[in-house]
Image: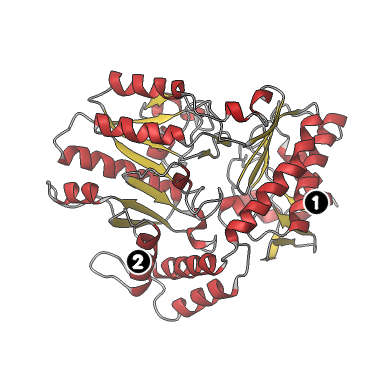
């Protein structure tokens, strides 16, 4: 079966998919249903979802409790504006979130991860203005980060990453080096950092990782409103796993310089790293936290921006005495009801941490052999995230074709062949994912998968 046989002609001619050409698009396979961890295509082909549908379907598909919550809510109240009104789904979700994150005080609902990033930056600016620090109009972040595709969110993503085409048109932010100290035990095999593999003496944090951040904070002391970053796991910017002590150092530095600390947990939240939230590895609290993706188990779009009391109080006690943002679909009742059910489902999955440990162990054991392939630079794993870093960019279309025969859905990103399977993935499914990843690497070596040189219609993610 050719991958092109599964492409809808209207879709190919008129529907513009993410990160691909409108004229010569990468094939978009027609899906007719999804259940458990399986995606079924229009010709009956079944694929194990190794991507959690871009990391959000963290519990798989067709979960009865969540599906029923959506059906029940649509008969009651599908949507209502959140200005001047409220409703039980928003209230109930808020209670659940503050139970999970009791150090937070207020929740601002939004409709996507990128919008949540925008809101957090605006919130930090309004906070600094309320404190009389009106010159603090810029943001600090680290390289290899990713916070979304909307305008201001792009500005705090790595400028050498997927948004380089916009260049100086974006606001110019302050970028510090990302940390070099890896998360202990996360490097499974490496041709260039082999010293970290099974070497407990090198699992400690190198304080020099904070030097560039310190320098930037001192140099731009009266300019920086906030520092935003993904805790522990840098996602679409490179899938790097860094040492928790880096976050401890950042918390201290932000306090010293009156800088708001923002943790973007959109991809890392709700169990993905082995903890409910990635910040727990460092046991430090951000001033603002972003949630999304797994918040609704992938059923419907929703995000949340949570802040500590000092942020919301300062904004609300200074002119204009309100937070200046208001998404049309803010706190959509369908999305909030689904999120409540998703959190209940995760709570009922009382062995989810055991499941993540099993997934992590399986990924480490079964992906390690990939390092023998000439095309492979490094293998790293943390929680339910497995990464094979290649020396060259992956040929997305050729790998998608291989996926059809291998029965696994993988979507390479740049030079990364990676998996973020649902947390409910069972051993046989995980083994199939790992075999597929190893096979793809072997076929790159043999030339069965064509050159990894970037074709004009190759996508970034």
**Discs 1/2, front:** 2
90 sits left or right of 63 in the view: left
437 sits left or right of 75 in the view: right
Q: Earlier in the sequence, mark 1 or mark 2?
A: 2
Residue behind mark 2: 95
| Residue appearing at x 82%, y 50% in the figure | 406
Instruction: Determine the secondary structure under disc 2.
Output: helix
Query: Residue 396 sits in which quadrant?
Result: top right
117 sits left or right of 48 in the view: left
| Residue appearing at x 37%, y 48% in the figure | 289
> Residue 67's x, y, as percent?
55, 73
As measured in the structure, the alpha-carbon distance from the residue carrying label 1 to the one carrying label 2 is: 43 Å
Total numbered circles: 2
Query: Residue 279 sits in which quadrant?
Result: top left
> Residue 288's x, y, as percent?
33, 46
> Residue 90's x, y, as percent?
35, 68
Query: Residue 91 sits in which quadrant?
Result: bottom left
70 over 20 or under it: above or below: below
Q: Is residue 2 visible?
A: yes
Q: Is residue 457 visible?
A: no
40 over 73 or under it: above or below: above
Q: Nearer the viewer, residue 432 or 82?
A: 432
Instruction: Determine the secondary structure under disc 1.
Output: helix
Quarter containing the C terminus: top right
| Residue appearing at x 18%, y 38% in the figure | 129
Q: Nearer the viewer, residue 36 or 212?
A: 212
> Residue 51's x, y, as percent?
65, 50
Residue behind mark 1: 404
């Amino acid at each position: 079966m050719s991958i092109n046989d599964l492409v809808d002609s209207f879709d190919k001619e008129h529907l513009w998919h993410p990160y691909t050409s409108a004229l010569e698009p990468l094939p978009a396979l027609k899906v007719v249903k999804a259940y458990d961890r399986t995606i079924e295509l229009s010709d009956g082909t079944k694929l194990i979802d190794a991507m959690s549908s871009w990391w959000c379907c963290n519990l798989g598909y067709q979960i009865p409790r969540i599906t029923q919550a959506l059906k029940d809510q649509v008969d009651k109240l599908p949507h209502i504006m959140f200005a001047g009104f409220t409703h039980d789904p928003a209230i109930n979700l808020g209670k659940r979130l503050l139970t999970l994150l009791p150090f937070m005080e207020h929740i601002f609902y939004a409709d996507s991860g990128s919008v949540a990033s925008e809101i957090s930056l605006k919130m930090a600016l309004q906070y600094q203005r309320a404190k009389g620090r009106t010159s603090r109009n810029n943001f600090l972040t680290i390289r290899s980060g990713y916070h979304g595709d909307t305008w201001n969110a792009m500005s705090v993503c790595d400028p050498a990453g997927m948004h380089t085409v916009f260049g100086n048109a974006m606001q110019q932010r302050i970028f510090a080096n990302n940390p070099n100290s890896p998360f202990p035990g996360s490097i499974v095999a490496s041709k260039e950092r082999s010293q970290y593999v099974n070497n407990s003496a090198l699992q400690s944090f190198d304080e020099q990782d904070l030097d560039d951040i310190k320098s930037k904070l001192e140099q731009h002391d009266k300019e920086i409103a906030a520092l935003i970053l993904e805790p522990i796991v840098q996602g679409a910017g490179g899938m790097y796993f860094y040492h928790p002590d880096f976050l401890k150092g950042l918390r201290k530095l932000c306090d010293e310089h009156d800088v708001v600390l923002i943790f973007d947990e959109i991809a890392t939240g709700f169990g993905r790293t082995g903890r409910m939230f990635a910040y727990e590895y460092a046991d430090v609290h951000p001033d603002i936290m972003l949630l999304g993706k797994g918040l609704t188990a992938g059923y419907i779009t929703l995000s949340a921006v949570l802040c500590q009391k000092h942020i919301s109080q300062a904004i609300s006690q200074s002119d204009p005495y309100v937070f200046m943002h208001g998404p049309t679909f803010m706190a959509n009742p369908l999305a909030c009801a689904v999120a409540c059910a998703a959190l209940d489902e995760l709570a009922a999955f009382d062995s989810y941490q055991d499941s993540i440990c099993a997934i992590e162990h399986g990924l480490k054991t079964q992906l390690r052999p990939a390092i023998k392939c000439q095309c492979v630079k490094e293998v790293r794993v943390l929680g339910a995230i497995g990464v094979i870093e290649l020396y060259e960019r992956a040929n997305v279309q050729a790998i998608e074709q291989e996926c059809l025969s291998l029965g696994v859905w993988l979507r390479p990103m740049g030079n990364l062949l990676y998996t973020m399977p649902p947390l409910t993935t069972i051993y046989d499914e995980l083994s199939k994912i790992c075999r597929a990843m190893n096979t793809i690497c072997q076929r790159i070596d043999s030339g069965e998968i064509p050159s990894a040189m970037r074709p004009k219609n190759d996508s970034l993610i």
